[in-house]
Image (cartoon, coloured by chain):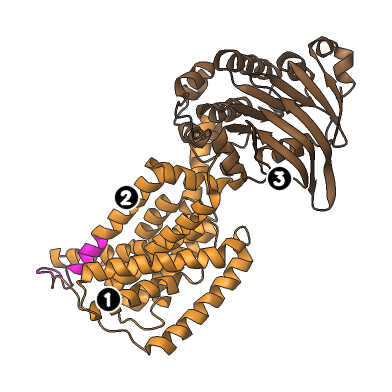
Chain colours: A brown, B orange
């Protein structure tokens, strides 16, 4: 589904990613964990096309998309949930969801019913301006917006950031349900222990722009093995 | 106040309201939505007026000539966006300097190319029977309301409108949702330009079309956009209503010059009391009411 090979990216002259290799298979939930400032957001931006790669390749669904802009990658089926949610504050909830319709252009099955089932609050507040909602509700909206177009791959940048712990648990549970029921492949970057342990089936650890370890299900269960790579 | 005087006052208001709305809508889209302070707005209006005047002189019916004016200005805006304006998004001061330069160049180029006046266009529809004024001003008012309704429908009900508003709010996120944001900017700028062209075309029959034609619209358009605040359509309607009322009342009492003076004084007071414009004040009030409930 997604294969990153020797991916390098930088901001100006400062190199951030220094040759990242990551593979995500169809139907998997894969995490990339690391402390602040190690390149997690840069990695996800390079994958969705919001940051140009200096070197290396991004292969999605068997196609090399390294040189494609973000909008083309989204229409191929990448659904992106940015850090800090980035809902459109002056659009209503329903208008925000409509924005997700452009994702995965080839698939015209829209998931409004499913999204409202996962997040009933979005249906209740469909006419409310998104900027007036709480952090947790905005996160649900950002996830719902990315799911509307039935993406093949859902990419999340720190879904727990700025969200209260009880909502983080709900969101983690909902993402697992999406993966099981709809079959959406999920790749996320995170530094929250709960999310890493309860969402990922497999997890890479990133430090200083390089993948330094890969943890399977057994090691993910061990708090010590995971916290080694997090600021806990 | 006697009935004829009331009718005259009403007619005055309708005329000024339509003028402010039509002078403002194009700028409201380009400045209010896209954040480009387009000091060449008057010259976009000029393109619409010249294209209409020459199309009428070439023998086209007035309505078709006006459509030519709108399309020519939208195309002009499209080319300008593609080659110059797109480098200025998020650069307010730079956009002012560049569009001011474009404005000066266009005025002089128009004078060199076409001389001091464009061919005249007659006022259609004749005079009103009761009030001292042409029927055409009522037509302009109807068109102004129609344009506001059309813009509301376009930017609220269509996929294009939702995507355009999303792009102006957060381009990066819109792009990551699959929206071709370059095309959105281009199309929105072309719509703003086309609206300016429509204004130029509509007023070609009632104003002498000279290279300085566009400057006659600048004061009202910028004042209305600033007084209206961040909400493009509601701001335009409320500011046009407020400024139009003041202008019409004082024009009726003391003549056109005093009407203009009173409108500008009212604008200064409004900006002093409502720094974020009328819609900014409404938004603050709504938040306060929301908190108190």
Q: Dot 1: within a 10 Å radius of its alpha carbon, few (fewer than 14), some, or many (20 or more) residues?
A: many
Give the image location of residue B120, x and y in percent: 25, 83
Instruction: For mark 1, give the secondary structure.
Output: helix
- Main secondary structure along the magenta-highlighted residues: loop
**Do the numbered discs 3 and 2 sit on residues whose CB atoms are within 8 Å?**
no
Sequence-earlier tag: 1 or 2:
1
Q: For mark 3, what is the residue?
A: A51
Q: What is the quadrant of the N terminus of chain A in the image?
A: top right
**Magenta stretch?**
B126-141
Instruction: For mark 3, give the secondary structure.
Output: loop
**Do the numbered discs 1 and 2 sit on residues whose CB atoms are within 8 Å?**
no
Chain to which mark 2 belongs: B
Residue B237 covered by magenta stretch: no
Chain to which mark 1 belongs: B
The furthest residue to the front? A62
Q: For mark 2, what is the residue?
A: B149
Q: Respond whether the residues carrying marks 1 and 3 are from the same subunit.
A: no
Q: For mark 1, what is the residue?
A: B55
Q: Against B290, is B172 above or below?
A: below
Left or right side of B257 for A183: right
Q: Quadrant of residue B85?
A: bottom right
Q: Is residue B249 visible?
A: no
Left or right side of A165 for B44: left
Q: Dot 2: within a 10 Å radius of its alpha carbon, few (fewer than 14), some, or many (20 or more) residues?
A: few
Instruction: For mark 2, give the secondary structure.
Output: helix
């Amino acid at each position: 589904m997604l294969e990153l090979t020797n991916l390098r990216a930088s901001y100006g002259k400062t190199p951030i990613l220094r040759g990242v290799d990551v593979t995500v298979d169809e139907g998997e939930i894969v995490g990339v964990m690391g402390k602040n400032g190690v390149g997690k957001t840069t990695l996800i931006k390079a994958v969705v096309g919001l940051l140009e790669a200096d070197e290396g390749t991004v292969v999605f669904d068997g196609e090399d998309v390294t040189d494609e802009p973000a909008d083309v990658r989204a229409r191929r089926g990448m659904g992106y949930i940015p850090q800090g949610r980035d809902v459109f504050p002056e659009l209503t909830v329903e208008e925000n969801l409509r924005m997700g319709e452009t994702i995965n252009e080839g698939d015209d099955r829209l998931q409004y019913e499913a999204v409202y089932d996962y997040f009933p609050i979005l249906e209740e507040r469909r006419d409310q301006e998104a900027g007036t909602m709480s952090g947790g509700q905005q996160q649900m909206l950002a996830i719902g917006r990315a799911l509307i177009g039935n993406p093949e791959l859902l990419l999340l940048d720190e879904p727990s950031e700025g969200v209260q712990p009880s909502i983080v648990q709900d969101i983690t549970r909902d993402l697992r349900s999406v993966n099981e029921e709809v079959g959406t492949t999920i790749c996320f970057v995170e530094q929250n222990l709960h999310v890493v342990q309860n969402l990922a089936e497999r997890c890479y650890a990133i430090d200083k722009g390089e993948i330094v370890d890969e943890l399977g299900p057994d090691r993910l269960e061990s708090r010590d093995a995971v916290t080694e790579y997090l600021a806990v | 106040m006697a009935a004829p005087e009331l009718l005259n006052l009403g007619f005055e208001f309708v005329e000024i309201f339509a003028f402010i709305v039509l002078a403002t809508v194009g700028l409201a889209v380009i400045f209010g939505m896209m954040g480009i302070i387009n000091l060449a707005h008057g010259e976009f209006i000029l393109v619409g007026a010249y294209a209409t005047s020459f199309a009428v002189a070439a023998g086209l019916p007035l309505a078709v000539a006006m459509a030519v004016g709108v399309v020519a200005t939208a195309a002009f805006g499209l080319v300008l966006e593609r080659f110059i304006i797109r480098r200025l998004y998020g650069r307010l001061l730079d956009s002012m300097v560049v569009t001011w330069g474009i404005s000066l160049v266009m005025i002089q180029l128009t004078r060199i190319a076409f001389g001091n006046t464009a061919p005249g266009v007659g006022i259609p529809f004749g005079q009103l029977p009761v009030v001292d004024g042409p029927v055409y001003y009522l037509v302009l008012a109807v068109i102004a309301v129609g344009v506001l309704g059309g813009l509301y429908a376009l930017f609220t009900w269509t996929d294009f409108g939702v995507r355009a508003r999303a792009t102006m709010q957060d381009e990066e996120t819109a792009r990551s949702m699959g929206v071709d944001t370059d095309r959105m900017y281009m199309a929105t700028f072309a719509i703003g330009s086309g609206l300016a062209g429509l204004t130029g075309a509509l007023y070609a029959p009632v104003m002498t079309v000279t290279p300085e034609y566009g400057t006659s619209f600048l004061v009202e358009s910028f004042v209305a956009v600033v007084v209206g605040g961040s909400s493009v359509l509601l701001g335009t309607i409320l500011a046009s209503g407020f400024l139009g009322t003041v202008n019409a009342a004082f024009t009726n009492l003391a003549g056109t010059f005093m009407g203009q003076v009173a409108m500008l004084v009212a604008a200064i007071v409004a900006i002093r009391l409502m720094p974020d414009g009328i819609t900014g004040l409404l938004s603050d009030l709504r938040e306060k009411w929301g908190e108190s409930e």
